[in-house]
Each structure stands twice: as structure tokens, then as C-alpha cells.
């Protein structure tokens, strides 16, 4: 981004001068222009879409064994209403109505029947594949354009395993909180004095889902790389990623339902294409937030080297 070239276009030159005057707190006089310059350079030269494709493929492969293991565990959880709430929670996160209908029969069959042999056989495989999915995310982080410290292969895999187990616990804990909130809402509003209880329950589910995403992304950014702890646990990249996740979910749902005709073109395999595309776009968003954090870390490191 050459400054001399920018000055030849008045509107771009005006924005450059404006961004150069905006100083970022904590970076000792470095401007918003410096941040955007380094951030965009990292995106363009960091093979973002290629890394996102690798993450999406590995995560897609890990998604179904992990979901299979969690769903197989459902009948063994002694919490009333846990099955229904987890299933509704899964349907909320799916990108379209067609994908929800496509998986509903399989999900309900696994969730309502105790497959003991499936649980014992799938436990180790699901943990390995789920860890591989998280490990692909961490590897995608380490292939950033910016120079960062990296872990050994074994240490990174152990970190990925720990993050995978924490994310699984976070999912189960989130569903438990949703069940508790449903009970509280129905108890406080039995006659509908404060409006339809279903509305408040649905709103609580969405807010809790956003909070779970926010914490999960923070976990990946903070522990995903060695230098992640140089940022706060709730970092600017986490906020940026969570906002983009929410916007992408809404726009993607509109796109699938109003414009895309995957099922008519490809038949039943169209659902797989929709899910894969959804994961790929979210992988790009995840890397965009990570690159923002990495850029801030790099700028702070460069600033320290000057003094």
C-alpha cells in the first residue's frame, strides 16, 4: 500500500490522512492506517482461503463423529428435557431448514436409542477426529503471514485435545443452562404476563448461543498459539469474529432459502454442499479475527523493539 500512489486519488488520499491521524491506544502513537496496512497485507499474502479450506475439510470430517458421540451420550444424561433442548440447539445452528430436515431422522434415532456398542466403539475415534479438527484450526493459525512462535507437533496436538474436551464440555454446559433458564422463565411468567414465554425462551437460546461462540472463539485465540496470551482472553479479534459469525448466519440463511437452489440441482447431496460451504465461510471469518489479533501482537512487538 504505497502512500505516494494513494495521494493520486483524492478520496483515497483523504482516508489515508484521516486514518493516519487516528492513533491506537496502547501502541505508542501507531495509527489506524498502520494497523489496516499490516492487517490487509497479512490477509492477502497469508493464503487465507487456502488455510480456510484446509480447516473446513478437517472440521467437516470431525463434525459427524463428534456429533455422533455427543448424541449417543444423550440418553445417558439424567436431566429431564436435555435431549429435546440439545436437539433444538443443534437445529438452531444449522444454516437452513432443508439441512435441519435432512439430519432430523438420524439425530432423533441416535438420541432416543441407547447404542452401547456404538458408544464404546466411537469414543476413541470421535476424540481423535475431533482433536484433528481443532488441530487443523491451530495449524491454520500458525501458517499466518506474520512471524509467530510455534509449538512442537506433539505439544500442539495435546493442546488441541485439551481444547476439544473443553469445547465439548462448553456445549453440554450451555444446553444445561438453557434448560435451567426455560424452567426459570416458565416459573416467573406462568400466565404470560410478560408476553409469550416461547419468545423469551427463544431469545435466551440465541443470546446463550452467541455467548458460547464468543467464549469458544476466545479459547481458540488465547490458547491456540504460544503468543495468544499476549492479548486479553476477550480480545478485539474475538469481538470481530463473533459479530461476523452472527451476520454470516443471517445472510447465509437468507441466501440458501431465497436464492440458492442446491437441493434442486444436486439432490440430497445439496445438503452436504450447504453445510460444507457454511463451514468454509465461517473458517474464513475465524481466520480474519485471528489475523486481527496477530496484527495487534505484531505491532506491539515492533513497537517494543524500537525502544
Image: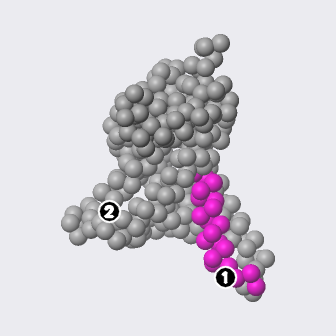
Instruction: Classify 173 as above or below 225.
Output: below
Q: Give the answer, above or below, for where 302 lies relative to 252.
A: above
Pick out the residue farthest to the right. Answer: 188
Quarter of the figure that contains the C terminus = top right
Q: Is residue 273 left or right of residue 230?
A: left
Which tag is nearer the camera, tag 1 or tag 2? 1
Q: Is residue 85 above or below residue 118?
A: below
Residue 282 vertical placement versus 21 (above, below): below
Residue 283 in the image, given as x and y percentages of width and height: 42, 45
Q: Earlier in the sequence, mark 1 or mark 2?
A: 1
Q: Position of residue 223 (x, y in %)?
A: 59, 33
* Residue 113 seen by the camera: no
The part of the image, by quadrant, that contains residue 25 is: top right
Secondary structure of residue under mark 2: helix
288 drawn magenta:
no
Residue drawn at x 51%, y 27% as measured from the top left: 156
* The one of 50 and 299 positioned closer to us in this rendering: 299
Q: Quadrant of residue 52?
A: top left
Residue 149 visible at all: yes
Does 102 sit left or right of 205 as displayed?
Answer: left
Q: Residue furthest left?
A: 265
The residue tagged 2 is 271
- Image: magenta residue range: 193-213
Q: Residue at x 62, y 33 (%)?
A: 23
Q: Residue at label 1?
A: 196
Camera-side residue of 299 and 107: 299
Amino acid at each position: 500500500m504505497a502512500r505516494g500512489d494513494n495521494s493520486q486519488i483524492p478520496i483515497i488520499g483523504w482516508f489515508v490522512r484521516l486514518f493516519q491521524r487516528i492513533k491506537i491506544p496502547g501502541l505508542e502513537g501507531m495509527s489506524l492506517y498502520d494497523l489496516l496496512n499490516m492487517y490487509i497485507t497479512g490477509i492477502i499474502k497469508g493464503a487465507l482461503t487456502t488455510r480456510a479450506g484446509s480447516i473446513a475439510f478437517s472440521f467437516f470430517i470431525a463434525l459427524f463423529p463428534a456429533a455422533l458421540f455427543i448424541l449417543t451420550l444423550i440418553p445417558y444424561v439424567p436431566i429431564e428435557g436435555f435431549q429435546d433442548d440439545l436437539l433444538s440447539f443443534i437445529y438452531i445452528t444449522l444454516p437452513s431448514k432443508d439441512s435441519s430436515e435432512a439430519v432430523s431422522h438420524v439425530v432423533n434415532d441416535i438420541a432416543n436409542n441407547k447404542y452401547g456398542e456404538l458408544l464404546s466403539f466411537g469414543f476413541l475415534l470421535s476424540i481423535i477426529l475431533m482433536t484433528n479438527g481443532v488441530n487443523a484450526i491451530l495449524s491454520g493459525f500458525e501458517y499466518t503471514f506474520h512471524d509467530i512462535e510455534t509449538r512442537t507437533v506433539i505439544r500442539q496436538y495435546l493442546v488441541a485435545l485439551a481444547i476439544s474436551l473443553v469445547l465439548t464440555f462448553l456445549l453440554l454446559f450451555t444446553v444445561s443452562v438453557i434448560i435451567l433458564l426455560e424452567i426459570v422463565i416458565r416459573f416467573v411468567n406462568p400466565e404470560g404476563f410478560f408476553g409469550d414465554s416461547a419468545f423469551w425462551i427463544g431469545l435466551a437460546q440465541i443470546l446463550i448461543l452467541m455467548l458460547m461462540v464468543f467464549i469458544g472463539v476466545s479459547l481458540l485465540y488465547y490458547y491456540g498459539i504460544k503468543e495468544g496470551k499476549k492479548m486479553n482472553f476477550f480480545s478485539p479479534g474475538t469481538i470481530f469474529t463473533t459479530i461476523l459469525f452472527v451476520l454470516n448466519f443471517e445472510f447465509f440463511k437468507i441466501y440458501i432459502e431465497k436464492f440458492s437452489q442446491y437441493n434442486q440441482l444436486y439432490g440430497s447431496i445439496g445438503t452436504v454442499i450447504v453445510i460444507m460451504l457454511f463451514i468454509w465461510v465461517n473458517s474464513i471469518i475465524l481466520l480474519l479475527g485471528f489475523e486481527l489479533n496477530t496484527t495487534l501482537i505484531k505491532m506491539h512487538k515492533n513497537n517494543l523493539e524500537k525502544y
